[in-house]
Image (tube, rainbow, N blue to C red):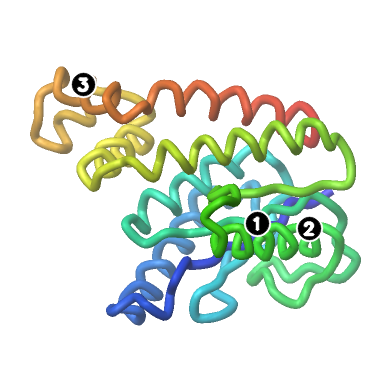
Amino acid sequence: MYFAVIGDIKNSRKIKDRFQVQEQLEQVLEEINSEFDNYIAAKFIVTLGDEFQGLLNSTQPIIRIIERIMLKMYPVKIRFGIGFGDISTKINREMAIGADGTAYHHARRMINEIKKSHKSRRSDQTSVKIAADDNISIVALANSTFSLWSLIQGKWTQKQVRLILETVICEDNQREVARRLGIVQSTVQRGLKSSGYYSYLHTKQVLEEVLLREWG
């Protein structure tokens, strides 16, 4: 079982500093490849100007990887299609291209579904969707959670995003976050509370546990 992740920059052609954004994305992916090396079957790599992909051998880091890319690329919006399944061809660990199988087919289908839904204001505006051949009810629950996350994240300000990113990096050590940002701990706590971070964090932790239990 493998877990394919395909990411796509939303409205990339409308971005003024497109080259700079691409460079930033490449740097973020290098950090992901280094930090989550033990879980990577094929390294994350930019495959097109506005698209990238990677392949994982466990569900354990998926949520954290998506979260890290979203926060570090803000205000650029990223869409993610995730597929759980098999790989039927040889895997090149140094780059997630050239391989094929149901994992990638599911991930591609999810990206296309998100793009289609974003064109309709009445459709689900989620930025993350997963697909798998089994545990359909859990997949549906996960996608509902991602939809709610997208709603919460869409209301975050730039200051809140920076605060949440530092909180994630510091593993919820508010004193360290306050020190790094040059503010007091009470300001950190108020900022996280007003952003809805704690509700987001709780559902994230539960979803990570469910995905790991069902797929490993």
Mark 3, Cα crowd under 10 Å, few <14 / some 14-19 / many 20+, is few
Query: Looking at numbered disc 2 in the image, what kind of residue is underneath it?
Result: His
Q: Nearer the viewer, residue 96 or 8?
A: 8
Q: Is residue 183 above or below residue 34?
A: above
Q: Decide: marks 2, 3 in contact (CB < 8 A)?
A: no
Question: Is residue 179 shown left or right of residue 154?
Answer: left
Query: Looking at numbered disc 3 in the image, what kind of residue is underneath it?
Result: Arg
Q: Which mark is residue 190?
A: 3
Q: Element under label 1?
A: strand
Give the percent coordinates (x, y) of residue 30. 46, 63
Q: Is residue 49 above or below residue 27?
A: below
Residue at horizontal 28 percent and vertical 78 percent from the top: 17
Q: Which residue is labeled 2 in the image?
A: 106
Residue at horizontal 44 percent and vertical 57 percent from the top: 31
Tell me which numbered mark, 1 or 3, is placed earlier along the sequence: 1
Give the percent coordinates (x, y) of residue 78. 48, 59
Mark 1, Cα crowd under 10 Å, few <14 / some 14-19 / many 20+, is many
Q: Element under label 2?
A: helix
Give the percent coordinates (x, y) of residue 84. 79, 49
Question: Is residue 131 shown left or right of residue 158?
Answer: right
Residue at horizontal 44 percent and vertical 71 percent from the top: 11
Question: Is residue 149 shown left or right of residue 88?
Answer: left
Q: Could you give the CA–CA distance between mark 1 and mark 2, rounded to whole angstroms?
A: 8 Å
Q: Is residue 157 visible?
A: yes
Q: Decide: marks 1, 2 in contact (CB < 8 A)?
A: yes
Residue at horizontal 25 percent and vertical 23 percent from the top: 174
Q: Nearer the viewer, residue 198 or 216?
A: 198
Q: Could you give the CA–CA distance between mark 2 and mark 3, rounded to whole angstroms?
A: 40 Å
Q: Which residue is labeled 1 in the image?
A: 81
